[in-house]
Amino acid sequence: MHIEQTLKLDYQDVLIRPKRSALPSRAEVDIRREFVFKHSGHRYQGIPILASNMDTVGTIEMAAALSPLGLSVALHKHYDIDALVDFFTRREDAGMHFYSMGITRADHDKFERVLGRAGAAIKNVCIDVANGYSENFVRFVESFRRDHPALTVMAGNIVTGEMTEELVLSGADIVKVGIGPGSVCTTRVTTGVGYPQLSAVIECADAAHGLGGLICADGGCTVPGDIAKAFGGGADFVMLGGMFAGHDECAGESVERDGKRYLRFYGMSSETAMKKHAGGMALYRAAEGKEVLIEHKGPVAATVQQILGGVRSACTYVGARRLKELTKRTTFVRVRSQANDVFDRE
């Protein structure tokens, strides 16, 4: 047994301290990023916010809505082969989005069949498991990179610097960071395992950037300010589930209560998801997700406008003319502890 004494922080534990700024308007802020991925060599240009590969959020309809706005989607892995082939071969913007998969033989075989029909239209793959610390997962990422050197690979989830380094060295271009912070994830309650998300982002970003890799902060953002904090902490991409849930473009059952419309939203390790996709919960495991009802929000475009406006505004408060400058200009002030310590990222 070991107790780590170093302070660890979540998004709600800090605020970003304002600084003098020469920016005359939020309109002057450029929130697009450009990256060249370490292993695939592909060039990315866009707003580095993704809809999560949850089956209610990572939908084809969501991709159609977010593409014109410069955002991407990690499609959920439960679409059938024909639907995925149709998406990647018919949409000109398909190269912005991610094919999602697990690491089972069935996942691998399905991907190869889709790739065989869609070919070069697939450019990005998200290899997604709940526990990225498994040796099987690392071996799968290594093997996948050997077999597909031209594909951009996002892999996770993990929360520590040393595992970030291992995944980057094993072939991941982007490491997905987050265990337990999601709004419908109960891993921390069910297992006692997790890591405060802001600290995970800071530590994993430092590890990845030292090797030329990137990270995607996955989970824990409930308001636009949290997204700004993730970018301020060093995240290259931010993945959102709950903030994109409940919109017209989402899948999931609609429920009417007291004259209001709600959409069901649930974690992918919840009992609801297990019943839907695996026929039920296996006897050897417990649910690590829950189901909630989210009041219908209408088209996702309005939410995106609020998110991007919040991030632009955060940049103006610290004088960052471009999103890539935000982490260099961010000073986090602790607000939920007795001490008013300051952590400066400059």
Image (cartoon, rainbow, N blue to C red):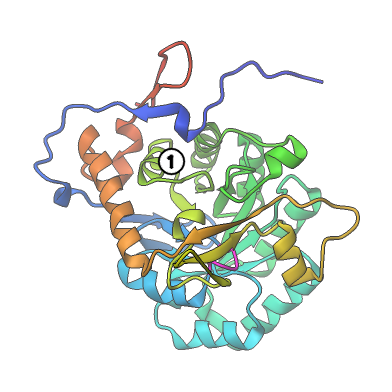
Using a 10 Å C-alpha cutoff, classify the residue at mark 1 as few (fewer than 14 neighbours), some (14 to 19) or many (20 or more). many
Query: Where is residue 52 shown, x and y percent of the image?
Result: 53, 60
Give 110 or 229, whichever is nearer the viewer: 229
- Prevalent SS, magenta region: loop
Q: Quadrant of residue 18?
A: top left
Q: Residue furthest right?
A: 283
Image quarter (top left, top right, bottom left or bottom right) of the C terminus: top left
Q: Quadrant of the N terminus?
A: top right
Q: In this rendering, would 169 be left or right of 305?
A: right
Q: Position of residue 178 (x, y in %)?
A: 59, 44
Front residue of this view, candidates 22 and 43 = 22
Q: Nearer the viewer, residue 288 or 17?
A: 288
| Residue at the spot 68% in from the left edge and 45% down from the top edge | 186
Which residue of the protein is positioned furthest toward the top in this rendering?
Answer: 339
Residue farthest front in this picture: 258
Residue, disc 1: 230
Does residue 319 appear in the picture of this structure? no
Decide which of 90, 42 is in the foreground and name it.
90
Could you tell me the amino acid type at mark 1? Answer: Ala
Instruction: Please indicate, yes or no, whether residue 220 appears anywhere in the rendered image.
Output: yes
Q: How many marks?
A: 1
Q: Secondary structure at mark 1?
A: helix
The quarter of the picture where residue 296 lies is bottom left
Classify 196 as above or below 182: above
User: What residue span does the magenta drawing correspond to?
Assistant: 53-58
Residue 123: give x, y in percent of width and height. Answer: 51, 72
| Residue at the image point whose x is 72% and y is 18% from the top | 3
Q: Residue at x 54, y 76 (%)?
A: 122
Q: Decide if residue 222 is on the left or right side of residue 23.
A: right
Q: Is residue 318 above or below residue 286?
A: above
Q: Residue 31 at what x, y percent from top left?
A: 28, 52
